[in-house]
Amino acid sequence: MTKGAYAYHYPSKRAIAVALVDHQIALLGESDLHARATYEGGGLRGLIDVILMIGENNAIDPIYAAASTVSVDPVALELALPDTFPFWHGMVASYLVEAIALGEVDPATNTDEAAGDFITTMIGLAFVQRRRHRSFGSQPLRFLAVTLRLAGALEPEPLVDEVIRARHAVMPDAPRRG
């Protein structure tokens, strides 16, 4: 793309950032649909599948990875970007509600609070992993299980392992993140 074409399609920094965030939201929606089609009833398996797809998208799609950074970067937030938090929050909360119905999450869990805490923790983990410690070994998935447990999950470790095995059975060449 020439500089002129680039400037035509994206006349400002905000226009670039909005395009990145729109791309991310579209892929998140696709990930959500895929997880719901794969795991009837959603629950923790669906949520874990979405989280793994997010990791894969960050690893293989530079536009998605840039959107992940831009959507929470303090400097970029001054660009008045679309707020992705309500989308994320609604998606995670719905998986937690389904997980309660499936007996995977403690019924006393406040799903709104747990969804907010889950998202905040996962964003923090992603930034620590990308910016400071490129090689976490198996820790990102361990942190996923710990974060799920903090969100009320009763026994998330076997579910994380199950979803990972299923994803690698279907896509053996998919990037392995931990």
Image: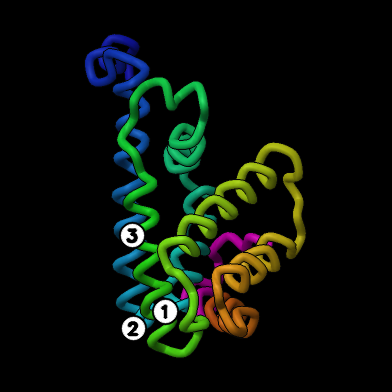
Work out how far the residue at label 2 is from the one at label 1, CA to CA, in angstroms: 6 Å
Q: Secondary structure at mark 1?
A: helix
Residue at 55% in and 75% down: 152
- Main SS, magenta region, reads loop
The amino acid pointed to by label 2 is Gly
Check contact, mark 2 vs mark 1: CB within 8 A: yes
Q: Which residue is mark 1?
A: 43
Indicate which disc, 2 or 3, sits on the residue closer to the N terminus: 2
Q: Which segment did they paint magenta? A: 166-178
Q: Is residue 131 visible?
A: yes
Check contact, mark 3 vs mark 1: CB within 8 A: no
Residue at 33% in and 21% down: 14
Quadrant in which the N terminus is drawn: top left
Name the one closer to the observer, 152 or 137: 152
The amino acid pointed to by label 3 is Gly
Label ID, residue 90: 3
Q: Is residue 110 left or right of residue 6?
A: right
Name the one closer to the observer, 93 or 158: 93
Q: Secondary structure at mark 2?
A: loop
Q: Which residue is mark 2?
A: 41
